[in-house]
Amino acid sequence: MTTRRELLGACAATALLAACATTPPSMEDKPPIVFVHGNGDSASIWLTTVWRFESNGWPRDRLHAIDVPYPLSRDDDAKPQPGRTSAAENTAYLKSEVARVLAATGAKQVVLVANSRGGNAVRDYVQNNGGAPFVSHAILGGTPNHGVWADPAYLPGNEFNGAGAFLKGLNAPKNGAGDEVTGPVKWLTIRSDNNDKYAQPDGLWIGRRGQPTHVTFTGPELKGATSVVIPRVDHRETAFSAPAFAAMHQFITGRAPATLEVVPEERVVLRGKVTGLGVSSTDPASGNFSNNLPLPGAQLTVYAIDPATGERRGPAVHSQTIGADGQWGPLNADRSARYEFVVAAPGYATTHIYRSPFPRSSNLVNLRPERLPAADLAAPAVAIMSRPRGYLDPARDRMSFDGQTPPPGALPGAGVASSRVKPTGPARPIVAEFNGERVVGRLWPDTGVRSGSGPWTGEVSVLELHY
């Protein structure tokens, strides 16, 4: 049910958008924004943040989320590691993307908005790689600016070690006041009060329970920057939650947003990229690693589904073979409809992805098939509840998965972002719920039927939460 607050917010934003339709916003009022994702993530994680900026009058062509091809950091920043990037390589990619956005928009400067590791690249670009003249504002959500740990004896060459050379160099005083940020760029840090898994005094979330990290809850703050503290948000919500968006908008424009809601638009067109998972050529036993490289040859099929049961409503509404660039779409979508996205590719499980309706267009609907571990291949069915923009905290949130409260694997302390179940029985609906968002999908049990000549790789249902 729409609340009065939501209705008033939507009306305010609608009026704002109507004004923008007749008077295009200036670069000064609505500058280009470049969004920088964190370790192991992709551009798609900014989906709802982009929608909120659009709902407050930002032109879509001034909102650019980058997609680092290899988003994971190295174990030791100085030592090459297959499928991973050094801090310098991460910064170089950001620098090239900023240049591209400036050329495309004609703007003289951009705003940089980053989450987690993305903030390291932002700081390095501005401080050490000539970025200061091209950046008006830099916003860092949950960036571990003083490290996830600060211990010269533990992984000393790691990018996230606050006692390591990389972060010590970034944090060196810039003036007599001891500021850690580079002017004249305006800086904002957004952090949790005490619920960010990567700003904890105890090493629980880095596999060192009971050992001090030498980092405090205030670790993401920087001297010389404006600081916003949002109670109880987790590491990802420092960038992707509605309160984080409100802080960003206020900092960029000097005023509160007209609405925190995503305002629906009449015509919805969806696009995105299909990506895969890498396997180290030098150490295949080390497992899969995230990348944002295209998965050419993958088959994508999209179905409209019954919102109550997850069953398909007729034939596919979209089908294509993914090309060399990995791009899929366009899909002219119904903003109130629910869809099943099916991705099939050699070496991957056939992955059925279910999400909430898409109220606005997006080119960030990125899709990645799963690879099931050997233990799951013997399971009768596999389903995953995933929350890319936040964690599952039973001590804070209302949630359930397949009728289980809390979902299996969810831990107090906002440190787990997904839950996995292996139900028995026939195909049936399966439901994921989180703080009012409800996603319905279908289970795809192993029927024992094997098609093709390759090894059986299974099927999996992924119920992915937007918010």
Image: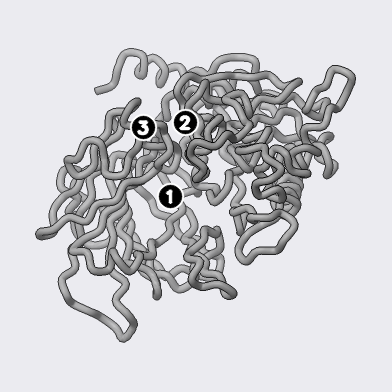
Helix, strand or loop status at disc 3: loop
Looking at the image, which residue is at 29% across and 83% down? 452
Q: Estimate the x, y position of residue 139 in percent, counting from the top left.
A: 65, 30
Looking at the image, which residue is at 22% across and 45% down? 440
Q: Amino acid at mark 3?
A: Pro
The residue that disc 2 covers is 234
Asked if disc 1 and disc 3 are in contact, CB closer than 8 Å, the reply is no
Q: Nearer the viewer, mark 1 or mark 2?
A: 2
Give the alpha-carbon distance from disc 1 to disc 3, as whole Å.
35 Å
Judged left or right of residue 335, residue 62 is: right
Q: Amino acid at mark 1?
A: Leu
Viewer-proximal residue among 63 and 83: 83
Q: Quadrant of residue 324?
A: bottom right
The residue that disc 3 covers is 412
Viewer-proximal residue among 398 and 415: 415
- Density class for disc 3 (Cα within 10 Å; few <14, some 14-19, many ≥20) is some
Give the alpha-carbon distance from disc 2 to disc 3, as whole Å.
11 Å
Q: Estimate the x, y position of residue 268 in percent, counting from the top left.
A: 40, 43
- Density class for disc 2 (Cα within 10 Å; few <14, some 14-19, many ≥20) is many
Q: Estimate the x, y position of residue 211 in percent, counting from the top left.
A: 54, 37
Give the alpha-carbon distance from disc 1 to disc 2, as whole Å.
29 Å
| Colouring | one colour
Q: Quadrant of residue 28?
A: top right
Helix, strand or loop status at disc 2: loop
Q: Nearer the viewer, mark 1 or mark 3?
A: 3
Pick whichever of labels 2 and 3 is earlier in the sequence: 2
The residue that disc 1 covers is 270
